[in-house]
Image: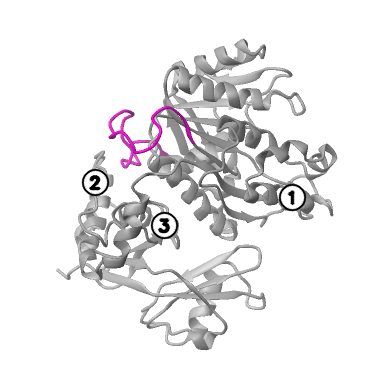
Amino acid sequence: MKVNNLLHPTAEKPGTRSVPKFRDVGVGCAVLMPHAPILVAGVGGERSGAAEACRQAMRAAASTVVSLQPETLVLISPHSPRQLRAFGVWADDPLQGSFAQFDAPQIEVSLPVDAALARAIASEMHARDWETWTIRHCPLDHGALVPLWFLVEAGWAGPMVILSLNYSGGDGLTIMGEAIAAAAHELPRRIAVIASGDMSHRLAANAPCGFHPQAHVFDEKFIQLVRAGTYRKIQNMSPELRELAAEDVVDSTLIAASAVNWQTDGHQMLHYEGPFGVGYGVAILFAEKIEAKATKIATKKTARKSEGTVLPGLARRAVETALSGSLELPPAPMNEYLNNSRGVFVTICHRNGALRGCMGTIAPVCPDVVAETWRSARLAALQDNRFSPVTADELPALQFDVSVLHAPEKVATEADLDPRRFGVIVSAEDGRRGLLLPGIKEIKTPAEQVNIARQKGWINADEPITLQRFQVDHFEEPAG
């Protein structure tokens, strides 16, 4: 699978979208995304299921970035080549690389470079008496590739600037953040900043850097600061604690936070887990508010389920356009129900009932049900790693069903479940989750439902769990 704008035709050329309802110039969004290759579908193999919750959070962060419609993305990778005092600026056009060193050479990313913004950032750094150097003629590292894979999956096909750090302890991090913001205003550009970084690499005996019993303390303190939005205090974290944790998240996060002038609007810690001895944290550090949000909330009270009957046809159209290579975007919501923001699952089956693909999100990652359905349909058809991608020849023999999720509610025991009426979310203490939709004919009892949800979340039968149930609005494509 080649991950570029041909495979993901949700993306469009820069400058073709309407002007968004937030600031037109400067840094409108900053996110933190880990860079473990095992998070990428097709790379992790059987082990990747243990990080499914993190994968979903990465999709949520990527969708947030893309939905805010920046003109350029700026990404800081701690694995890009480094020099002692100088920050690196990638100059190849296109910026590209693959996961060949992780036994997946078929998974590639290729995006254009924003050379003008790259030059402007270098100029702003030089004006502040800091050096930069140009990185040329080498493939992108996984610190850049993993976040980019999720961004492309979410629909990004626009230009990039990718930066490398100087050597650890070299300072200049907040100066780089200020230079990014200044360059965006100078050109001008509307940009988003992505900090790539993993937390402790020493959480377990099989971790990449071995085990240290205090490594978890770094993760706990870092997450506490991010969750509280006190980004400046990250600068004061103990160098000794950072070293024993073998982290590579602090420097890139400080650049991103200073690029948004330490603002915290819309900040949210989306997820944290450490399933392979490395801490993966996904967070929205800053996201400008969209003015239309209040209107969207107000319409929820009068929305009617009957207004969602168009969704199966919309899901089919999303896959048809993806397979044809069209750059068609999802249509605007045409009624109140579709204008809501809800989690959506799209299920694709053969006419005989055999499953062909099913993907979606528990919590919404897109601005409305239309965009959520469009995205989930393409993921179900092209990215469900249990199946080969759907082909155009198959489409006439397939049926599309759409499930729009209501907000989940916590329940005490299995006695509160009903697999015919409620879906279930099973959560382990470390963040692993398994979800099962309601109304699956083969599942008769709550115990069966919980057991299968455990398996989907890679949660053992003897592990303690919390239970949530939810209802769905289910829409089936007419037969024939």
Q: Quadrant of residue 353?
A: bottom left
What residue lies at 52% left-to-right and 53% top-to-bottom? 57
Whether the magenta-drawn stretch holds residue 170 is answered as no
- Judge whether residue 21 is colored magenta: yes
Q: Nearer the viewer, mark 2 or mark 1?
A: 1
Gap between marks 3 and 1, in whole Å?
28 Å
Q: Which residue is mark 1?
A: 221
Magenta-colored span: 1-28
Specify the quadrant that holds the N terminus: top left
Which disc is residue 364 wearing? 3
Which one is earlier in the sequence, the residue at label 2 or at label 1? 1
- Position of residue 315 measured from the top left corner of the image (x, y, whole percent): 26, 57
Mark 2 or mark 3: whose residue is earlier in sequence: 2
Quadrant for the C terminus in the image: bottom left
Q: Position of residue 295 (x, y in %)?
A: 32, 53
Which residue is the site of mark 2? 321
Q: Position of residue 356 (x, y in %)?
A: 34, 63
